[in-house]
Each structure stands twice: as C-alpha cells, then as structure tokens.
Image: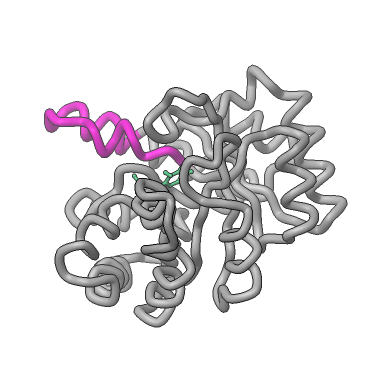
Amino acid sequence: MARLGVNVDHVATLRQARGGREPDPIAAAVLAELAGADGIVVHLREDRRHIQDRDLQILRQTVQSKLDLEMAADEAMVKIALSVRPDFVTLVPERRQELTTEGGLDVAGHRERIKDIIARLHEGDIPVSLFIEPDLEQVRTAHKVGADLVELHTGRYANAVSFKDVQTEFDNIVQAAKLSGKLAMRVNAGHGLNYFNVSRLLTVPEIEEYNIGHSIMARALLVGMDRAVREMKALIDSQTQIP
Ligand code: PXP
C-alpha cells in the first residue's frame, strides 16, 4: 500500500498571516496522523515564511509516523537537520521570490555540492530524498550523488490541461519512476496533487509515497482536517498497486 505524507506548511502560513499562535501546524499534524497520515512533511525555508524552527523541534517530539524535512541544499540547513534528526530529508530548490517550490532540484547542475550535503547527512544517519523533475538525466545523477530516494515533481503533470499533455507528463513520471526503481532508489511523488489527478499516478507501482499539502488543506478548511485526510488516504488505499 502506498503511503500518504501530509504537508502542513499551509497551516503555518495562515498563522504567520497574523503573526500569532493559531492555527498551529502541530495540532494539524496530530489530527492528520489520527486520520491516517503515514508521514508529516514540513519545509523549513530560509526566510521562515511559514514553518518556524520551533515547529520543527516540537514536531520532532510529537510526530509518531515519519517526519520529512524539506530544505534547501545549504550549510545552515544541514546543521539544523543534523541536530533535529528528521526521519528523512528532502532537498528542494529554494528561491526567495517563488510562491512555492517551482521546478525540481537541478542535481546535474549542482552535483558536487549536493553530493557533499548528502554525504554529511548520511554521516548523521539521515536518509536523503532529492526532489527532481521526472527526467532521466536527473534520476541518473541523483543515483550517482548517493540519494536514497527521489521525489518526482508532479507539478507539470498536475498543471497539464490537454489530454496529450497529461499523457506526456504521465509517461515522463512512469519512465523516471522505473529507472529510479532499477537504480534501487525509492520513489515518492508530490506537488500539485489533488483528489482528482492523483488517481492515475496510483497505477505506477514504483511510487511508494505521495506528499500532498495544498489540496488537503484546502479541503480541510471546508470539511475539517480529519475528513480531508481520510478521504485522500482512502483514495490512495483503494487504488495503489504496491503489494
Ligand atoms: N513535495 C515537495 C517537495 C514540495 O515542495 C511541496 C510543496 O511544498 C509538496 C510536495 C506539496 O505540494 P502541494 O502543496 O502542491 O500538494
């Protein structure tokens, strides 16, 4: 059965909008786990626009499932990861002005730096996932630099409109997932996934985990966190092919 990682960054975004204490992403993570989430995902950004250091520290003490820390490939973040010790780290690109994470990490273009950062995290026994476009060269390079997992960026698939474009983007994900599997890297997928477009990806047997934030939080606002997470979890459970 594939797993569901719930990203609670948006809860922190709402809190930061008023600079106060609510809503608390810690409470959201507890509710998400009670509703069946297999993991909690947070992105500690350099500009701290949503998740704060305090959130990460408390989540490390309270998350019962797996804590996935998304972070930029830089020195300051490596220090934080080595001290907080999430269950795994996902390296993502980070540019200050972007609305969210746009595009995957260019592993091929920053090979030595990423290799070095993965080695440092491995010294601390922290497995590392690389958030990459479903591109065969990126997959091969991810393997060469020592990644344990890849998270395939599903944004292009999610944004594709025409039948042809959806098919093309889906095929890219299938090929990248297959190659990752052959290279013995585990495969996660995420970005832009919702209750409609996730279904087709569930037919890709290599994908072990779906990391979903926006669509679950948007639904939670209307029907509550428990129901929003349960509905996504049920969708994933009903259709995945992983034995
Ligand atoms: N995976 C990664 C690496 C991300 O950066 C994000 C966005 O924070 C997500 C998954 C979740 O994307 P969404 O909020 O569109 O579901």
Q: Residue at x 24, y 52 (%)?
A: 194
Q: Residue at x 77, y 35 (%)?
A: 75
Q: Quadrant of ligand 1?
A: top left
* Chain part drawn in magenta: 152-171
Q: In the picture provided, is 155 more to the left or to the right than 109?
A: left
Q: Position of residue 198 (x, y in %)?
A: 26, 53
Residue 82 seen in the current view: yes
Q: Out of 107 and 60, give the one closest to the viewer.
A: 60
Q: Residue at x 52, y 34 (%)?
A: 132
Q: Give the image location of residue 166, x and y in percent.
A: 21, 34
Decide if residue 192 is on the left or right side of residue 42.
left
Query: Which residue: 43% across, 48% down?
Result: 189
What colour scheme governs how the chains and residues are painted in the rendered image of this protein?
A: one colour
User: Is the stretch drawn in magenta largely helix, strand or loop?
Assistant: helix
Residue in front for this viewpoint, 12 or 114:
12
Q: Is residue 77 magenta?
A: no
Image location of residue 168, percent across then percent down = 27, 29
Q: Residue furthest left?
A: 162
- Image quadrant holding the C terminus, namely bottom left
